[in-house]
Amino acid sequence: MTTLPLILSPDVQAAKSAGKAIVALESTIITHGMPYPQNVETARMVEEDVRNAGATPATIAVLNGVIHVGLTDAELEDLGQAKNVAKLSRADMAVCIASGGTGATTVAATMIAAHLAGIKVFATGGIGGVHRGAEETFDISADLLELAQTPVTVVAAGPKAILDIPKTLEILETQGVPVISYGQDALPAFWSRASEYTAPLRLDSAAEIAKAAEMRALMGLPGGQLIANPIPESDEIPVDVITPYIEQALAESVAQGIAAKQVTPFLLNRMFELTEGRSLTANIALVRNNARLAAKIAHSLCA
Ligand code: PSU
Ligand code: MN
């Protein structure tokens, strides 16, 4: 019988053995979510943010058929520069590993790897969700179903604003996923602090978020929680400013027949071009903000 090829970096292994706070980080945001070199710079800053908050960062990727939990600086740099890296989700992760491939992990795949490594908290930018036009395309991110079955608390700035937010909330509710807005009633909308929708749930401290995760486990309920953490005010792009760009990027993706795994990277890249880099600056700020909150939650879970 083959064993699972899973390697924890020395830092992550040490933190785990000592029962210290660890925050998982994904790699698709590096390979498919941001251009080089800002992708690698951001990945490094986010790791540093987690360290400054007293926790250990564990960036996750599949490299040559091995799940790596915690990457070296050289591995981060290589991933950030690599072209044509696979974008892995629940459906294709095992095939990639079995065939010795290399791939970046999405929210779904990062949750799977984090859980295998015993990590309970994960920070990202925005989760995937129900795409606009899903009633025709059926394009619904596997991130949503992963949240329903894998016990990891995911800190994001809400669903990405390119998505159909009410439909995304409906699926999460059907799947029994708690969607918890942090410190406000409104559901955050990625680049903007507030969407026009009220979040189903609200908590105001990392300790309460940790307690809710523990309660879910005590009840034997599978799945994680989605923490929607609003982008800091100084970094946000207001809804009325960002909306026309979203509409344009979406119209172009439809006109060009962009589908499946290409949709989200295409839209994020077009938003970067249309906003002349402003969407990227906001994206970087929100990921860092999420990493800081995730570190606090990880601490509370250790206490
Ligand atoms: N957050 C970001 N940028 C990203 C992503 C998240 O700020 O690029 C990635 C995550 O990996 C997420 C993926 O899982 O986008 C969603 O892809 P899809 O819509 O194809 O499921
Ligand atoms: Mn999709």
Image (cartoon, rainbow, N blue to C red):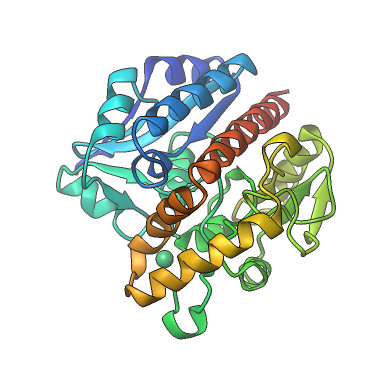
Would residue 172 be found to the left or right of residue 87 on screen? right
Residue 10 in view, yes or no: yes
Instruction: Note whether 85 is above or below 162 in the view shown.
Output: above
In this rendering, would 204 be left or right of 299?
right
Q: Is residue 216 above or below residue 171?
A: above
Residue 203, compared with residue 69, is above or below; it is below
Relative placement, left or right, of 192 versus 64 is: right
Q: In the image, residue 201 lies at what x, y percent?
A: 80, 56
Q: In terms of depth relative to the viewer, which is nearer, 79 or 98?
A: 79
Residue in front for this viewpoint, 16 or 85: 85
- For the point 58% across and 48% down, the residue is 151
Q: Quadrant of the N terminus?
A: top left
- Drawn side of residue 184 relative to residue 21, left or right: right
Give residue 104's position: percent from left, percent from top: 33, 43
Residue 121 visible at all: no
Q: Which residue appears at 61% of the width and 15% of the height?
A: 52
Residue shown at 34% from the left, 34% from the top: 36
Q: Position of residue 11 (x, y in %)?
A: 44, 15
Between 39 and 50, the one nearer to me in the picture: 39
